[in-house]
Amino acid sequence: MRYHLTPIHCRPWLLNALSFKLIESHYENNYGGALRRLNAITEKLESLDFDTTPGYVINSLKREELVALNSTLLHELYFASLGGEGKPTAPIAEALARDFGSFNRWKSEFVAMGNALGGGSGWVLLVYMPRDRRLINQYAAEHTQAVAGGIPILALDMYEHAYHIDYGANVKAYVDTFMRNVDWKAVEDRLEDAAKVEPPRPLVQPEFGDLPGVAVEEVKAMLNAGKPVQFIDARPRHFVSRTQDIIDGATWRDPDRVQDWAGELSKSDPVVVFCAYGFHVGCKTAIALREAGFDAKFMKGGHSGWRAMGGPVKQHV
Ligand SMILES: [Fe+2]
């Protein structure tokens, strides 16, 4: 396979205080160089016999492939980030205010990250994360750092080749100039596309229908707020004897004997029940309690999820 060239997106004659010489050199030598290198590496990889090639050769080529691929992609985004007047559109200002507090707060962080890379090299990226449906500013060194599953929508190149011809070592002036040239309408369009990407699919247990579940963070907040929650650890007996710890605030009850202890619970206060990981046992116990007339929910992720969140546990006696 061959990677194809993406034409330069910004119109160099519209840029403010970035010279043709700088932009042409950057596009032709650095972007073009990365793309040409990527294709040469790809060709080399395609010619290898992976059964006989030493591991160090594969490591080295795959690493170089990643560097060249990310450099290609980020440079395409960099040139597509330029060509505007640096004035954020209303939807972008709104999205940045939602995720950073205000546009200016976002800008302070982004600009400070660029300035902090002066004398070094790397990228500053504004990235949309489908998992949390939000934007973050990301630092990337050597082209290779990327948020897994993130979609970059604005790229600031902080390699010296991006500014030295015009600004020498004056990093701050370059970053300010970049901000004055951002094409925010194009960023808005990319955000619109990125926001259509669905978060990773949640765990689905169709066998339990629409049994209501509650997140570990939510349960912790309820307990911290002193809400009257009946918090039941329904891990199977062998789990409890093996792990020897119990969630602080929870009471262990044998899931095999629900009928024996259900009568001790109050029907007016909610019940949150959990098992080891949030699968069958906790769900089945919650269903049994609901059928008996309790306002019961299962805790997603169970005991293990609670511990992973950093929730308090105590020794089981
Ligand atoms: Fe560059």
Image: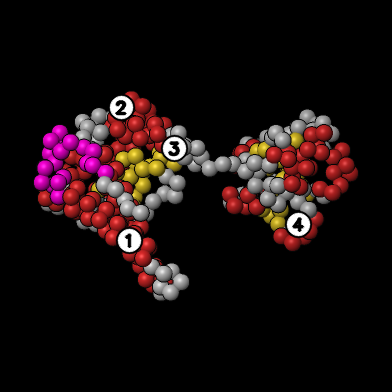
Task: Give the x, y percent position of residue 233.
Answer: 75, 48
- 10 Å crowding of disc 2: few (<14), some (14-19), many (20+): some
**Which residue is nearer to you in this view: 314 or 110?**
110
Looking at the image, residue 52 sits to the left or right of residue 92; the answer is right
The label number, if any, that marks residue 240 in the structure image = 4
Q: CA distance from mark 3 to mark 2?
A: 17 Å
The residue to which callout 3 is attached is 134
Residue depth check, mark 4 versus mark 3: number of the one nearer the observer? 3
Of labels 3 and 2, earlier in sequence is 2
Element under disc 2: loop
Where residue 286 sits, quadrant-wise, is top right
The residue to which callout 2 is attached is 89
Residue 80 seen from this side: yes
Q: Are marks 4 and 3 in contact (CB under 8 Å)?
A: no
Element under disc 1: helix
Of labels 3 and 1, earlier in sequence is 1
Magenta residues span 6-25
- Callout 4, which amino acid? Val
Residue 219 seen from this side: no
Inspect the magenta stretch and tell me whether residue 8 lies in it. Answer: yes
Residue depth check, mark 1 versus mark 2: number of the one nearer the observer? 1
Ligand 1 near label 2 (Cβ, under 8 Å)? no
